[in-house]
Image: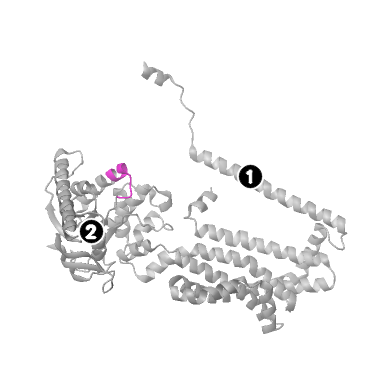
């Protein structure tokens, strides 16, 4: 059963003005429970806007989005942003608890469990300012998993980190995901990252339309050094290059 | 061969960076304390010399002032007049907060209200305190309301401007994060908005506090029926300079206690998450 269904979604900024611009156009896809879906595409193709619309932070112009929960109650969402977005005046543990709906013992235990999974148990009482950028982002990931979301949204969570830290966090994310099997929608402009992490890649093209929906059928855990992963990464990268060339030609013809 | 050489190299003495940082911080603190003590000794020396130069009738010695202060405390006047001044100052502060904080909130939150209040608040903040003191006496005459109004008029613009800056300093990305996790507006106010404006409110309180006491005492000098300012005027009329200075001395001691022990401590406690607060606590 699909956790997320997006149907004919469109988004136009500055509707009804001379500055009106359509960033998403006729987007339709669904995401089944327990799958890891990446949305890739060049800068400005509407990836983050799509994620903000799914999370409810931003309104859409037309189309439908439906989200179902396993429990039958209102669906819960977790969000990992590009930057950690932690409250600087609250300790790591209090940041984890801030997004929880209750203060019960099982909730506290769940927060501790995910903090342990990202290797920050000892830093539970630290303020975010006392942690490195990579550690703060790990808290952001643990916080999102700890709400036990029906859908976890991740918006380029490793783009602000150095390559080595990002690689470590990707491996850690794969481990946590393998254990929790949450439904994830992951936005990135990095195809290599998308192939390493995802079951499926939705490619958006400039103008905000879906160009291609690619299934990644590779065993897990995946590592960049694995030749099959590297081959598939090269193939997807090639398809993306072809899309860019096609978009360039189309815009030249239109001009 | 190389391995042996490395193995034979003398082990580096164990270094503990945290202990080193603590030692440096302790040395710095001792140096600063020494300078503060030196400053007080220099002040005492200048006062003694001035007293010798002008004569003790015109400028009593520190000892004479201290004795006069002891006399004031023992007579019981101190408690009555001081509590009167303190109550008036805090009442003025409360009025300023009640008026200034909502204005500051509106100025920080909405551009229209900012445009409406900005010039008025800026002008109110630049009017000299003495003008407020005189105005308050004209409006309320010889009553307790004069000093309260003067303190409120002086403090309100500071509070409004600082609260407005605090509200404008709220990190929008934290608000978006809270909304994405389904936090209620009440939770966002409590966990994001209020902690953001706390440092600004503290800055406003400390700034106002320094000015408010002076204005309150000044208003009492001009037209009070009790309080520290009233006593200073009375002693001045009796030409008892030692008593005038003693009242001033007691006044300063009380202010320092409030500033150093109450305001500074509670600020450090509330803002312990800031890196500069943590490093100063080392």
Q: CA distance from mark 2 to mark 1?
A: 60 Å
Q: What's the mark number on residue A45?
A: 2
Determine which quarter of the picture holds residue A44. bottom left
The reply, left or right, for residue A228 in relation to residue B251 is left
Label 2 SS: loop
Determine which quarter of the picture holds residue B234. bottom right
Q: Nearer the viewer, residue A205 or B187?
A: A205
Q: Looking at the picture, how far across and down is residue A32, in whole percent?
A: 14, 59
Q: Chain of mark 1?
A: B
The reply, left or right, for residue B208 in relation to residue A130 is right
Is the N terminus of chain B in the top left, top right, bottom left or bottom right quadrant? top left
| Residue at the spot 34% in from the left edge and 70% down from the top edge | B184
Mark 2 and mark 1 on one chain = no
| Residue at the spot 44% in from the left edge and 21% down from the top edge | B9
| Residue at far top of view | B1
| Residue at the spot 28% in from the left edge and 73% down from the top edge | A17
Q: Chain of mark 2?
A: A
Q: Looking at the picture, how far across and down is residue A55, in whole percent?
A: 26, 64
Decide whether residue A163 is among the magenta residues.
yes
Is the residue marked by circle 2 packed among few (<14), some (14-19), or many (20+) residues within 10 Å? many
Q: What's the mark number on residue B30?
A: 1
Determine whether B205 is above or below B272 in the image.
Answer: below
Label 1 SS: helix
Q: Looking at the picture, how far across and down is residue A131, in whole percent?
A: 40, 48
Q: Is residue A163 visible?
A: yes
Determine whether A130 is above or below B168 in the image.
Answer: above
Is the residue marked by circle 1 packed among few (<14), some (14-19), or many (20+) residues within 10 Å? few
Q: Is residue A33 visible?
A: no
Determine whether B242 is above or below B139 in the image.
Answer: above
Decide whether residue B191 is among the magenta residues.
no
Magenta range is: A159-167
């Amino acid at each position: 059963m699909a956790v997320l269904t997006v149907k004919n979604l469109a988004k136009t900024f500055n509707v009804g003005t001379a500055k009106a611009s359509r960033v998403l156009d006729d987007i339709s896809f669904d995401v089944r429970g327990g799958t890891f879906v990446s949305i890739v595409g060049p800068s400005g193709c509407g990836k983050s806007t799509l994620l903000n619309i799914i999370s409810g932070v931003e309104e859409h112009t037309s189309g439908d989005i439906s989200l179902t929960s396993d429990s039958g109650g209102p669906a819960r969402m977790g969000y990992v942003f590009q930057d950690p977005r932690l409250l600087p005046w609250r300790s790591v543990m209090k940041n984890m608890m801030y997004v929880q709906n209750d203060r019960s013992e099982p909730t506290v235990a769940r927060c501790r469990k995910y903090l342990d999974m990202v290797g920050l148990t000892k830093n539970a009482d630290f303020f975010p300012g006392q942690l490195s950028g990579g550690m703060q982002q790990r808290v952001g990931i643990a916080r999102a998993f700890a709400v036990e979301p029906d859908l976890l949204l991740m918006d380029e969570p490793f783009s602000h980190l150095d390559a080595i830290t990002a690689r470590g966090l990707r491996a850690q994310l794969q481990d946590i995901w393998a254990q929790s099997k949450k439904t994830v929608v992951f936005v990135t402009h990095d195809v290599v990252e998308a192939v390493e992490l995802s079951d499926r890649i939705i490619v958006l093209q400039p103008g905000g339309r879906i160009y291609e929906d690619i299934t990644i059928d590779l065993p897990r855990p995946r590592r960049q050094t694995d030749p099959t992963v590297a081959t598939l990464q090269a193939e997807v990268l090639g398809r993306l290059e072809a899309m860019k060339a096609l978009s360039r030609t189309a815009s030249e013809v239109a001009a | 061969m190389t391995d042996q050489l490395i193995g034979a190299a003398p082990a580096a003495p164990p270094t503990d960076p945290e202990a080193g940082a603590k030692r440096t911080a302790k040395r710095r603190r001792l140096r600063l304390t020494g300078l503060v003590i030196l400053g007080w000794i220099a002040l005492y020396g200048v006062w003694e010399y001035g007293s010798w130069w002008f004569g003790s009738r015109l400028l009593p010695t520190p000892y004479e002032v201290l004795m006069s202060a002891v006399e004031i405390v023992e007579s019981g006047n101190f408690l009555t007049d001081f509590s009167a001044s303190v109550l008036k100052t805090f009442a003025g502060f409360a009025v300023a907060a009640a008026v200034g904080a909502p204005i500051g909130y509106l100025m920080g939150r909405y551009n229209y209200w900012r445009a409406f209040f900005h010039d008025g608040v800026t002008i109110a903040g630049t009017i000299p305190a003495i003008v407020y003191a005189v105005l308050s006496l004209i409006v309320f005459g010889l009553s307790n309301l004069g000093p309260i109004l003067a303190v409120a008029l002086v403090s309100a613009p500071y509070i409004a401007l600082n609260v407005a800056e605090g509200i404008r300093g709220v990190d929008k990305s934290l608000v978006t994060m809270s909304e994405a996790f389904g936090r209620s507006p009440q939770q966002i106010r409590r966990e994001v908005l209020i902690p953001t404006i706390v440092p600004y409110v503290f800055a406003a309180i400390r700034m106002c506090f320094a000015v408010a006491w002076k204005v309150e005492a000044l208003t009492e000098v001009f037209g009070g029926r009790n309080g520290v300012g009233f006593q200073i005027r009375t002693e001045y009329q009796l030409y008892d300079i030692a008593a005038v200075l003693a009242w001033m001395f007691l006044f300063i001691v009380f202010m320092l206690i409030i500033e150093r022990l109450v305001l500074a401590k509670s600020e450090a406690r509330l803002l312990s998450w800031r890196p500069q607060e943590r490093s100063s606590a080392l």
